[in-house]
Image (cartoon, grey):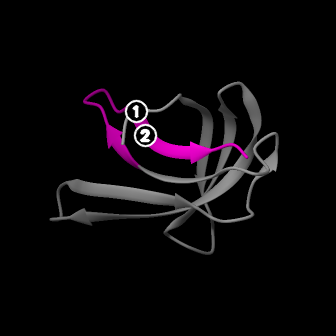
Amino acid sequence: MAWAHPLRGNVRRHPSSGSACQTEGSVQGREGAFNIVHSATTSGSDRTAEFFTIVPSSGAGDLAAITGAGGRAVDADGTHRICFDHDLG
């Protein structure tokens, strides 16, 4: 999996689930939103092996047909970066 085109926008945790988030922003210049579910491994002080999948049929706007899965990394300065293989439909 390679670092894909950047997602520019916001990720908000869904209030009813600790592992579901709504993602709003743009991918390759297309604006919209989609939901992801995610998981990670932790030893209590760190997080590794973080991954997510896009919830099928959750896309909206120009991202209505998006599908895919990926992972996340956090830089030392706190910047969150995601890499994902996706299809914009």
Q: Quadrant of the N terminus?
A: top left
49, 84: nearer the viewer: 84
> In percent of the image, x 17 and y 57: which residue is there?
45
> In percent of the image, x 73 and y 46: which residue is there?
89
- Secondary structure category for the residue under label 1: loop
Residue 81 spot, x, y in % from top left = 41, 35
Neighbours of disc 2 within 10 Å: few (<14), some (14-19), many (20+): some
Residue 41 sits above or below residue 32 on the image? below
**Of pointers 1 and 2, the one earlier in the residue sequence:** 1
Name the residue type under label 1. Trp
Residue 2: quarter of image:
top left
87, 60: nearer the viewer: 87
Residue 45 sits above or below residue 4 on the image? below
Q: Which residue is mark 1?
A: 3
Examine the residues drawn in magenta and state their main secondary structure. strand
Gap between marks 1 and 2 measured at Cα = 4 Å
Name the residue type under label 2. Cys
| Pointers 1 and 2 in contact (C-beta within 8 Å) | yes
Residue 39 sits above or below residue 22 on the image? below
Residue 61 spot, x, y in % from top left = 84, 44
Neighbours of disc 1 within 10 Å: few (<14), some (14-19), many (20+): few
Q: Looking at the rendered structure, which numbered label has been put on residue 68?
A: none
Left/right of residue 74 with respect to residue 23 in the rendered view: left
Magenta highlight on residue 30: no
Range of magenta residues: 71-89
Most extreme residue toward the bottom, as rendered? 16
> In percent of the image, x 38 and y 57: which residue is there?
51
- Secondary structure category for the residue under label 2: strand
Left/right of residue 53 with respect to residue 16 in the rendered view: left
Residue 76 spot, x, y in % from top left = 25, 30
Q: Which residue is mark 2?
A: 83
